[in-house]
Amino acid sequence: LVCASKRVIFATMLVLDGKIAAAAVKEQIAKEVQLLIAGQKRVPHLAAILIGNNPASQAYVGNKVKTCAELGFESTLIAEPAMEEADLLSLIEKLNKDTTIDGILVQLPLPKNINEEKIIMAIDPQKDVDGFHPINVGKMAIGSPSYLPATPYGIMLMLEHFKIETSGKHCVVLGRSNIVGTPMSILLSRNTNPGNCTVTLCHSRTQNLAQHLLPADIIVAAIGIPFFVKEEMVKHGAVIIDVGINSIEAPEKKSGKRLVGDVDYEALKEKVSAMTPVPGGVGLMTIAGLMQNTLNARLNKPN
Ligand code: NAD
């Protein structure tokens, strides 16, 4: 910690490296799989469904299937360029009944002809390893064992791995989506460790956003706007979890694009005490959360 002309500089900001935290979670999962194999028991089996030709979705599902193989899980990938809603519902019904399948993942977004809510509702809550089914969301809200939404769960695993103190801290969550912001606000306010935060949930209608952000000890940014959180909005020593994945133009890159988060990382890296990079932060923890859910589903042990 260095003091220079009234400015406190965190010379040693802790990079909340998703590679390191995810590797630790995955190592533990792989050990559990080895125990199943040693006991001649079935390994976890994830069924992933991908409809359409969205390149980002293809990359996400590809990573999930690859990680299954890395951990010794079985996986089944069902990829179709298009599908009728009724056919997808029948497929889910078949997977629900298949006792060799532990987890079902339907990659979102789905093409416009398919009602996402209907699809999420059709998945057996005990196989809902993305944690989107209202039964799991409800159980999460009342603190009962459930399958937690993979991204907020991954963030909790990351906070735990890096031993970030959350109890009694003031956390501001930016964004109220069903997959990130809202469940994150619930998990951080539960009586758990990590947890026990005092949470403020900000969204597109929040007034004086900077006024809410400034006192925050922990900020979770999940809005999808590049560099939205700026240096002057954040107090010295805060912890920042950047969930955003935004593609921006980068003429210096061969692809002409690069991925950035919702936070101005370069401007904040000397001001905050810990921060996730993008890429290489929360994205890797999302996959770790999904894998942990799939193992938990195999063992019939929601958390
Ligand atoms: P979303 O579009 O569903 O929700 C965005 C939220 O941001 C909304 O609740 C909205 O109220 C809020 N918002 C928008 N503009 C705002 C503003 N000016 N001020 C305050 N709040 C504002 O997004 P999402 O699905 O939650 O995703 C958010 C970001 O996180 C995206 O960049 C997405 O790509 C990324 N993401 C990353 C992962 C990961 O694994 N790293 C997982 C899911 C989503």
Image (cartoon, rainbow, N blue to C red):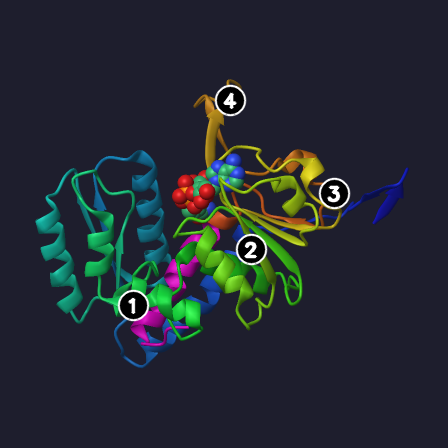
Give the amino acid at mark 1. Answer: Pro
State ligand 1's quadrant.
Answer: top left
User: Which residue in the structure is indicated by mark 1?
Assistant: 44
Quadrant assignment for the C terminus: bottom left
SS under mark 4? loop
Q: Residue at x 9, y 50 (%)?
A: 86
Residue 295 is one of the magenta-drawn residues: yes
Mark 4 against mark 2, which lies toward the viewer?
4
| Residue 237 relative to residue 148: left or right | right
175 shown above or below 45: above
Q: Which mark is residue 271?
A: 3
What range of the chain is rendered magenta?
284-303
User: Which residue in the structure is indicated by mark 4?
Assistant: 250
Give the amino acid at mark 4. Answer: Ala
Is residue 224 something that shows in the picture? no
Query: Is mark 1 in CB contact (under 8 Å) with mark 2?
Result: no
Residue farthest along the right direction in this orientation: 5
Mark 3 against mark 1, which lies toward the viewer?
3
SS under mark 2? helix
Query: Residue 110: x, y in percent?
Result: 24, 43
Find the distance from the CA under tag 4 to the CA under tag 2. 27 Å
Query: Is mark 3 in CB contact (under 8 Å) with mark 1?
Result: no
Residue farthest along the top direction in this orientation: 251
Q: Residue at x 19, y 69 (%)?
A: 100
Query: Is mark 3 in CB contact (under 8 Å) with mark 2?
Result: no
Find the distance from the CA under tag 3 to the CA under tag 1. 43 Å
281 shown above or below 224: below
